[in-house]
Amino acid sequence: MEDKKAHKINIDVIQLIKLIVKDKRQFLTYCGVGTIISIIVAFSIPRIYKSSVMLAPEETSNGFSGNISSLASMVGMNMKFGTSGDAIYPEIYPDAIESTEFLVSLFPVKVTSKDKEIKDMPYCEYIEKHQKSPWWMYPKKLFNIIKNKLKGDDKPAVDGKIDPSFLTKEQYDLCKAISGNIDCHVDKKTNVIDIVVTDQDPLIAKTMVNAVAAQLQVFITNYRTNKARNDEQYMEKLFEEAEAQYTKSRLKYATFCEANTNVVLKSVESKMEELENDMQLKHNIYTQVVEQLQMAKAKVQERTPAFTTLQNATVPVKHSNTPKVFILILFVFLAFIVRLAILIKKNYKEVLIFQ
C-alpha cells in the first residue's frame, strides 16, 4: 500500500495583497463599521476604579527554625518549622475572603459615593440598586428580576442576621458580585497581602478595601486567639467561683469570731481555728486563680497578631478601564480579519496553493 502524503497548503502572498488592494473599499467599509461598534462599546462600559492596600502580617516563627523558614521563603518555599501551631497561613487568606461568611459580613458596611448622591448606604443595597451595566446586559438583568419576583426570594437583611450557610438566590448573587470586586494576592516570598477592590465609584472603592482589610484582620485575630479566649473565659468562671467561696468563708469566720469574742472554750478555739484554716485555703485558691486569670489575659494579647500597613488605601484618581484606543484597534483588527477571511473564501483558488 502506498502511504498517503499529507497535502501542504501555501498562501500566495502577492496575489493576496493584490486582492486586498482591489477590495480596499470593502475593507474600509468593514473597518468603518468596526470603528463605530468599538465607539459604542467603549462608551457603554461603565468606568471602574481600583483601590488597594498592602498588609504585612506578624510572623510566628522564631529562633533557628524561624531563620530556616525565612531562607526557604526567599526561594519561594513555604517551610513552617517551629511555629506556634497556626493552621491558617497567608496563602489561604484569598480563600477566606471568598467564603460566604466573610462576604456576608460586608453586607452592612456603610458606603458614601464621591458625589454624595449615595450616603451611608449598606454596601449590599448599593451593589443591588446602584450598579451601572452595559446596554447588552439589560435583557439578562430584566430576566433575573422577573425570575426573582416569580420565585419570591426574600431580600437580604441588613440589620438582621443572615445565615451564611442558608442564603437566598438574591443573597447568593450579591455574594458573587462582591467576590468579583475583591482581589487578594499573597506574595509567597514575603507573605505581604495585597488587597484590591474594584468599584464604579472611587470613594466606595477606598471604603471597601479598608473594610475588607479590617474584616480580614478580625477574621485572623479571632482564629488565632480562639483557644486563648476560651481559656480566659474558663478562668473568669473559676475566678468568680473562687471569689464567692473566699468571701463566704471570710464572712463566716468573721461572724463566728464576733459572736465568740469573750468565750474561752477549747471547742470554740478549735472551731475558730478550723474556720481560719478554711478561709486561708480559700484565699490561697483565690490567689492562684487570680494569677492564672492574668496569665490567660496575657496569652490572649500574646496570640493577637499585629499587622503592618505597608501601603494605605487612597481614593483613585484615574479609572482602570481598558483604554478606548485599545478597544478601537481591537475591533478594527477583527473587522479586517473578518473581511480577509471572506475574501480568501471567495478567491481560495487564486490565493491558496495546494502541494
Image: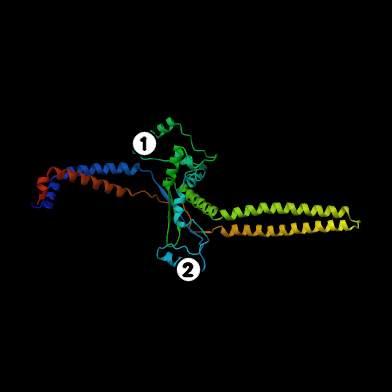
Q: Which residue, as the protein is rendered here, is positioned at the far front?
A: 267
| Residue 111 horizontal side relative to residue 342, left or right | right
Q: Position of residue 51 (x, y in %)?
A: 44, 52
Query: Which of pointers 1 and 2 lies earlier in the amino acid sequence?
Result: 2
User: Does dot 1 land on a helix, a strand or a loop?
Assistant: helix
* Quarter-of-image position of residue 273: bottom right
Identify the residue under disc 1.
Answer: 140
Q: CA distance from mark 1 to mark 2?
A: 55 Å
Residue 316 can be seen, yes or no? no
Residue at x 35%, y 41% (from the top left corner):
44
* Quarter-of-image position of residue 194: bottom left
Q: Position of residue 59 (x, y in %)?
A: 50, 62
Q: Nearer the viewer, mark 1 or mark 2?
A: 2
Identify the residue under disc 2.
Answer: 67
Residue at x 35%, y 35% (from the top left corner):
139
Amino acid type assigned to the residue bearing label 2 in the image:
Asn
Residue at x 62%, y 58% (from the top left corner):
296
Along the line of sight, the residue nearer the viewer: 257 or 141: 257
